[in-house]
Image (cartoon, rainbow, N blue to C red):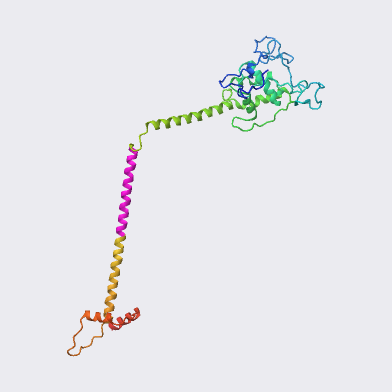
Amino acid sequence: MSSPWCGACDPHTRVDPEGQPCGACHPSAAGPVEDARRWCGECHRRTRLTADGRRCQRCNPLAALDDDPYRRRTWCGRCDQRDRMVRDADGVRKCRACHPLGRPPAQWPMHDVPDGYTEQLMACEWLCYVSPTLRRAGSDRLRVLLQLWFEAGWTPRDVLYALDHVPTGEIQAGEIPTAAADPKMTEAYVKRRLRAWLDGDDGPLPPVNRQIADNRRKVVAAQEAAREEWLRRTRVAVPPALSRGAAQARQVARDAAERNRRRRRAADDRELLRRAEELTAAQEQSAKWRELLIREALPHAEDPPPGAVTPTRDDRLRAALSAPTQMISLPTIGESLRTRRR
């Protein structure tokens, strides 16, 4: 029987940091359980069970253990008769004398792959203990059903997962036998559920733990490759001041800056030309208004008196500007122009 977890190894696999089975609590290190013996020839070769269904005392490695540890026993008189629990100063626990689960088998790590007849039988003993559905089949017949899967690298946890799920991750359909069902019904249930995990050659598919480990290894390998590539590029990288791409980038930036300066200069020239045209048009309009004002300031043409000097244009303009300022409206100017045309 395996010892309780020592605390110095992995609690699931019972493997020490060096990758070896723990010598203190791993089932393979347990002394009382001996290895599988050679077939005696008087019992069933695969199950090592006699004709009456008992373990062969000559070649079954677990012959010294109880054949059916889950059968209903008579009350021992030292525990509670209703639930077969012992209640004392140490707490509440299952009675080892008469409780069906009071004497658990050797605890096999659920993440460890059983190798060989004895380890497979111990793993099936633990599966029957943790799963009431498989309990009716018995560890000896269950080992025969799961031998192919254990040899393919499956762990007990992979078996429990495959019994409940299909390879796509969905829940398997169908009824689940109870702990009181017929053993043949339980065996048919195990065969039917595990049939979904067979490939085209009737071989077991990779277990879930191996798929997870392979995916993790692929991700880690891809990360390591990306890191190595980055380090390699860092080692062979040219300094930015000397790289060909940096020189090209600087030339492109200079060309872009020169194009922007030409665009701004052309825009400034167009703006200056527009303002000059507006100024010329305003000056022309001002000259027209000035001529109009001069003509309006001239008196009506009359014959000058004898001996009078005709004023020149500059004299008339000077007189008009020196006269009192008057507001001349546009309608007045227009009316004067119409009168002069008549």
Residue at 24% from the left image edge and 80% from the top image edge: 318
Q: Position of residue 296 (x, y in %)?
A: 28, 81
Magenta span includes 247 = yes
x, y percentage for residue 127? 67, 23
Q: Where, quadrant-wise, is the C terminus in this rendering?
A: bottom left
Most common secondary structure along the magenta stretch: helix
Quadrant (top left/top right/bottom left/bottom right) for the N terminus: top right
Could you say which is closer to the camera, residue 217 or residue 207?
217
Part of the protein shown in magenta: 244-270
Q: Nearer the viewer, residue 52 or 116?
A: 116
**Viewer-closest of 125 and 47:** 125
In the depicted view, which residue is nearer to us: 129 or 207? 129
Q: Image height check: is 129 above or below 287?
A: above
Q: Which image quadrant for residue 199?
A: top right
In the image, residue 19 above or below residue 299:
above
Is 143 displayed left or right of 240 in the figure? right
